[in-house]
Image (cartoon, coloured by chain):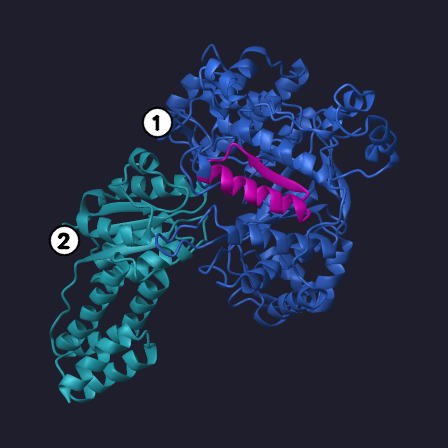
Chain colours: A blue, B cyan
Amino acid sequence: MSLKGFTRKFKALELLTEEQLTALHKASLDVLETTGVRVEHQRALKLYEQNGCKVDYSNNRVRIPPSLVEESLRLAPSSYRVKARDPKNDLIMGGDTVYFQPFPGTDAIDHETWETHRPTRKENYECAVIMDALENAHFMTCYTPFYGWQGVPAVMSIIESDAARIRCSSKAFETASSYDSERFAIKLGQAVGAEAWGYMGGAAPLTWPDNAIEACYKLLEADLPLQIISGNTIGASGPVTIAGATVTNNAELMSGVVLAQLIRPGARLLMMDFCFPQNMRTGSPSFGGIEAYLHNVVFNQIWHHYGIPTKTPPPGPTDSKRIDYQNGTEKATGAILAALSGSNLLPLMGGVYGELSWDPIQAILDNDLAGIIGRLLEGVEVTDLTMALDLINEVGPIPGHYLSSAHTRQNWKKEFYIPRCSDRLTYPEWMASGKKSCLDYAKARMEEILATHKISPLTTEQEAGVEGVLKEAREHYRKIGQISEEEWSVYQKQISGKGYPFA
Amino acid sequence: MEAEILKNLGNSILEFDPFAAEIWAKKAIEENVDPLRALAALTDSIRTVGDLFEKGEYFLPELVTAADVLQRAVPILEARIRETGGHRESVGTVVIGTVFGDIHSIGKTMVSTLLSANGFQVVDLGVNAPAEKFIRAVKDNNANLVAMSALMTMTITEQRKVIECFEKEGIRDRVKVMVGGSAITSQIAKDMGADGYEATAPGAVRLARELVGK
C-alpha cells in the first residue's frame, strides 16, 4: 500500500546536453577535491578523514576525492518507501512519481489589507486540517504550516507543529530541525508509527553548520530517510551564472551525500534544491525569479542522472505579497517546469511571499494547480481506443457529433481535469453567480472543509504518546533555560486551556 | 601631485578598482597628503555610487564592490590619521554579527560593508556569534548600535536572548538594537524588544543612521 501521487508518463524535460552534464559533474568533483567544503563538526571531520578525505582541522576544511563521491552517489537508493502513520499514505519516492506538498510560511494573512499577523493556535490547527483535506497535498509540510503561533516559545515551535500535523493528518510526516528538535520529532513519529523525515541543511557557499550535521547523525542513526538541502542565493552566496551556481550547489549536496553514506551506507536520501536569484536591489532573494526554476530543471536532470530522488521548493513561495496574477504566474511557471523536468516532490500549496506568509485560500488554489499539472503529467494516451477510429467513421461529418457517444461518456472524466475553484462559467452565469472569482470559490471550499472534513484521529494510546513527548520536550527546554519564565507563563495558560490541543 | 592623488583615489571607487585604491592610498601617505582629505575623496565617490544606486542605475554589486574598494584604502589612511594624532569622524560604532546557531553570512556582510562605507565604525563578529561575544564587543568598543542577523526562523530566539543579556548586563540603554534577516518581520522585531528592523541592506544603513540620530 502506498499513495500513488502523479506519474509522469513521458521523458523528462532536459536542458543540458550530455557534454554539458559531464562538464558540470566534473566541475563539481573538482570543487570538492580542490576547494573542499567547511564542516563544523568534529565527529564528521574524523569520519571524512578516516575514509580518504584530506581534512584541515585548522579551518574545518574537507577535500573529498572524486572516487569517494561517485561511490557514495551509487550507494544512495534511487527509489524507497517513507512510512506514514497510515500505510495507505506511505510514499514511494523516486522514478517518475511526482508528489505535491504544502510550502510553509511564518505568518497568516489578512485578506482585506494583505498584511500578515502571527497566527493563533486555532488558526494553525485549522490550517493543518485544510492541508489534510486537500487531495493533491500528498504529504504534509515540515511546519503546520506556520512556523509557530502566538504564545508558543520558539524552541517548541517545531515540536508543537509536528504534533499538530500528526494529530490532524495520517499523511507522511516531515520535520525541520532546530535546538535539537529532531530528537523529539523522531519520538513523535515513533509514537504513531510514522517515519520522521528531517533535514540536513547546508549554508552556501560550501559550508555545513554543526547543527545540520548533528541532525544528519540523529536521523540516520535512527534509520530514517534524510533530506539534504543546500541553497545558494544566485549571485550572492553562489556564482551569478546558473552554471556556476549549479556547480557550487552540486558540490555542497555531494559532500552531504558522502557524509550520509559514510554514516549509513544505503541511506535513503532526497536532494533538495533551494536556490533563488539575488534581488540586486534589496539584498533579499527573488523568490519568483525564473532563474530559480531554470536551476530546478538543471538540478533535476543532474540528480536523476545520479539516480537520487529530488525535491524542488522554489515554486512554493513567490515575490508577490498577495494572491494575484504575479503570484499565479510565478507558481505555475515554476511548478510546471519542475514537474516536467522530474521533481519527485514539489512543495507548492499555500506559500505566498518568501517564507513569510502562508494562506489556506492560496493552498486551495494551489491544490488545483497541482491537479492541473497532474493531468499534464498523464500526457496523451495513444491507443486504438483513444484514437477512436471506428467512432470517427461512425459519426462522420456534420450533423454528426460526439456528445452522445458511449466513448465520450466513458472517457471524458479521465481525459479532462476540472479544477474546483476556476471560474468556468459563461458570462450570463457569472453575472448571475454574483461575479464570483476563483478566490470566492476557494474561500467557499475552505469553509466547507472546516465544516465537514473529518480527520483520522489518533488512538488514545497514540495521543498519550504524542502528549508525553511534548511534555518531555517542554521540561527539557525549561531545564536548559531555553524557555523563560515569562514565556512559560503564557504558554502554560495555552496548554492548560479548555480547547487544547486544537485551540 | 596632491590633486592627481585625490582624483585617482576617487576614481578607484568609481572604477571599482581595489588595487588602485590601495596604491593611491599608499601614494597619498608617501606624498604627505592630508589623510582626512584623502578619505574625503574616497567618501565623495562612495556618495556618487550611492546616488546612482538610489536612481536605479546601479545595483548591489556596484554598491557592495565600491564599499569593498573603500575598505582597501581606509586602513592605510586611518593608520596615518592615528599617527598624526587625528581621528576619523565616525557616525557611530556598530557591533554586527549573525547570531549563535546560524552561520549564514551574506546578508550580514552586505550590511556590514555598507555601514562601513557610510561612515560607521564597524566591529564585525562574523557568524555564529553567541550573546557573550556581542556583550564583550559592545563594552570593548563603546558601541552605540548593535545589528543582528538571523536567516533561520529558529535563531530568532537567539536574537531575543542577546537583547535579554544586554538588559541583565545593564548595557541595554547604551545601545540601539536593529535586527534583520529573512526570518524576521517588524512584528517579530518589536516582540523581541529590538529598536528597529529593516528588510533590505540599503534600508539597514538608513535605519542605522536614524537610530544613532545622524
Kind of element beneath mark 1: helix
Task: Judge depth for marks 1 and 2 and give the one in front.
Answer: 2
Q: Which mark is residue A456?
A: none
- Residue A362 among magenta residues: no
| Displayed quadrant of residue B182 | top left
* Amino acid type indicated by mark 1: Glu
Q: Label 1 to label 2, Cα distance in Å?
A: 36 Å
| Residue B20 can be seen in this image | yes
Foreground residue, A437 or A355? A437
Residue A252, compared with residue A180, is above or below; it is: below
* Amino acid type indicated by mark 2: Lys
| Residue A209 can be seen in this image | no
| Residue positioned 48% across, 13% down in the render | A432
| Residue positioned 19% across, 80% down in the render | B7
| Residue positioned 57% across, 54% down in the render | A294
The spot of residue B125 in percent (x, y) is 35, 58
Q: Which mark is residue A486?
A: 1
Q: Local crowd at mark 2 within 10 Å, few (<14), some, or many (≥20)?
A: few
The spot of residue A341 in percent (x, y) is 67, 49
Read off the residue under disc 2: B214
Is A60 on the left-hand or right-hand side of A404? left
| Residue positioned 56% across, 22% down in the render | A130
| Displayed quadrant of residue A382 | top right
The spot of residue A447 in percent (x, y) is 51, 15
Foreground residue, A267 or A341? A341
- Residue A341 among magenta residues: yes
Which subunit holds the residue at mark 1?
A
Q: Local crowd at mark 1 within 10 Å, few (<14), some, or many (≥20)?
A: few
Quarter in which the N terminus of chain B is drawn: bottom left
Magenta segment, which residues?
A326-352
Kind of element beneath mark 2: loop
Is B76 on the left-hand or right-hand side of A449? left
